[in-house]
Image (cartoon, helix red, strand yellow):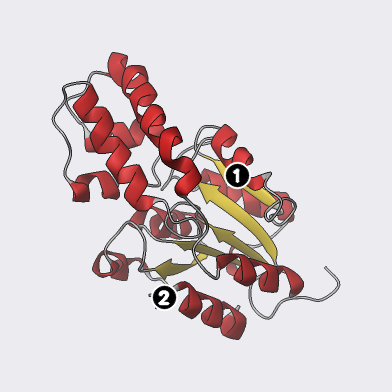
Amino acid sequence: MSQRPQRFDLIVFDWDGTLYDSTALIGHCIQAAAADLGLPVPSKEQAAYVIGLGYHDALARAMPDLPRERYAELGQAYRRHFFAAEDQLSLFDGALQMLRELKARHHWLAIATGKSRKGLDRLLQTPDLNGLFDGSRTADETAGKPDPTMLLQLMREFGCEPERTLMIGDTSHDLQLALNAGAASLAVGYGAHDPEDLTEFGALHICQTVTELQRWLLDHA
């Protein structure tokens, strides 16, 4: 780096619900897929809770009675609903400008997500995002959240110590991931989990909007 950031060298973002406005659609698609297969439909709260977990962990939490041999069938139904509406999704307003400002301040930017590698790469290859992130980890290539492996791997990739690493997310899974890896965390209260459920994980702050998140990062990161 030509200039060392103030506090954090590596800033790691969750994707869905933190940078990408997709939580409502994901929850709806989980419910619709369950209905397609004649399964008990999880509540909106149950569907939202599992966002950010790895695929198998999410299904085990949202539909505990579903036999594992039907996971693939449910996954196909979910993807059918999601891909039919994916082109309606976008980054939260202000998120792209925030990322560009952080990049200009010489932070390393990375993603740690419960998405698949294929799904994330499809999004990161768009013109606005291509080359913006320095690294990423997905749940299908390493352990899912809140296991610390993906964050530990990113820190090792950049030679970054936990005290110089900040994890940002909208769920308790993201914040527990940071705790398990020994890194600092920042919560956002506009995503999948209720802000009241994010208070017990030692986050430095809970930001209620992307504008507040941007301001906090520029002032404190």
Return the residue found at the far bottom.
Answer: 219
Return the residue found at the far left.
Answer: 40
Give x and y (percent) for residue 208: 38, 75
Q: Name the secondary structure under disc 2.
A: strand
Return the residue found at the far right.
Answer: 2
Question: Disc 2 residue type?
Answer: Cys
Asked if labels 2 and 1 touch by Cβ distance under 8 angstroms, the answer is no
At 52% from the left and 81% from the top, the residue drawn is: 216
Can residue 31 be seen in this snapshot?
yes
Crowding at dot 1, Cα within 10 Å, few <14 / some 14-19 / many 20+, comes out as few
**Which mark identifies residue 207?**
2
Residue 113 vs 91, above or below: the answer is: above
- Residue 13 located left or right of residue 3: left
- Res 122 quadrant in image: top right
Q: Which residue is mark 1?
A: 123
At 69% from the left and 44% from the top, the residue drawn is: 125
Residue 136 vs 54, above or below: the answer is: below
Can residue 164 be seen in this snapshot?
no
Q: Nearer the viewer, residue 190 or 52?
A: 190
Q: Nearer the viewer, residue 9 or 133?
A: 133
- Specify which label sits upstream in the sequence, 1 or 2: 1
- Residue 218 located left or right of residue 108: left
Question: Disc 1 residue type?
Answer: Leu
Quadrant where the N terminus sits is bottom right
- Residue 48 located left or right of residue 101: left
Residue 188 vs 47, above or below: the answer is: below
